[in-house]
Structure formats: structure tokens, C-alpha cells
Amino acid sequence: MPRKKYTAEFKTKIVLSILQGDKEFNVICSENGLNPNMVRKWKQEFLQNAHLAFGADSERKAVQRKEDDLKKKNDQMLRTIGQL
């Protein structure tokens, strides 16, 4: 039987429920039919990567600038080759 794959949205919903503390950890796991060890890993991964939520936009802009620069260089090289 193949392992069930959970979406990022579902994992986020579960982790946020745990962090809010409205229900006990084990209650959330049992209500959703989830292995507590797996959910602990989700929570750990979520917390380790939380800082990315605040820096993603600037990183995306930097990648876009680099991509634009590479396209310009590529176009320039193609024009140079065409002149040969």
C-alpha cells in the first residue's frame, strides 16, 4: 500500500493548529489520523523554515535580476555571432 502524500497546505494547517494550542497535540493527530512522529517532523521543518517567509520576495527579485542579466548577455552574444 503506497504512502499517503499530504499537501503543503494540509501540513501547514495541522502545524498551525498545534502552535495555536487550542487542542492537545495528540488530539489533533488522532482526529486527523496522523502519526504523531510524522507531525513532529512537520512542525520541526515548519519552524526551521519560517524565516524564509520573510525573505522570499527579496530572494525572488535577486534571482529575477540575475536571469534578466543572463538574457541580456545571451542576446548580446547572439548579435555578435550574427555579425561574424
Image (tube, rainbow, N blue to C red):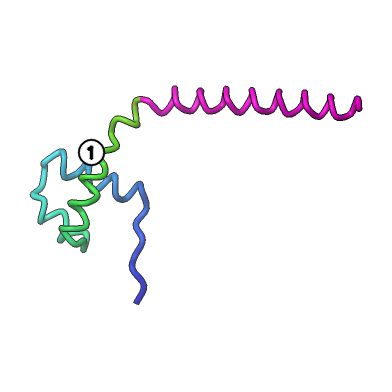
Amino acid at circle 1: Leu
Q: Is residue 51 above or below residue 20?
A: above
Is residue 25 within the magenta segment?
no
Snapshot quadrant of residue 4:
bottom left
Give how far across and how far down residue 5 sits, in percent.
Answer: 36, 61
What residue is rendered at 78% in x and 27% in y? 77
Q: Is residue 65 above or below residue 31?
A: above
What residue is rendered at 17% in x and 59% in y? 31
Is residue 67 within the magenta segment?
yes
What is the magenta segment's predominant secondary structure? helix
**Residue picked out by circle 1:** 47
Give how far across and how far down residue 43 sits, in percent.
Answer: 21, 46
**Residue, far front:** 84
Give how far across and how far down residue 16 sits, in percent.
Answer: 22, 41
What residue is rendered at 32% in x and 50% in y? 10
Snapshot quadrant of residue 64:
top right
Circle 1 — which element? helix
What residue is rendered at 71% in x and 24% in y? 73
Q: Is residue 9 left or right of residue 73?
A: left
> Which region of the structure is painted magenta?
55-84
Using a 10 Å C-alpha cutoff, classify the residue at mark 1 as few (fewer than 14 neighbours), some (14 to 19) or many (20 or more).
few
Give how far across and how far down residue 80 sits, in percent.
Answer: 84, 24
Q: Quadrant of the N terminus?
A: bottom left
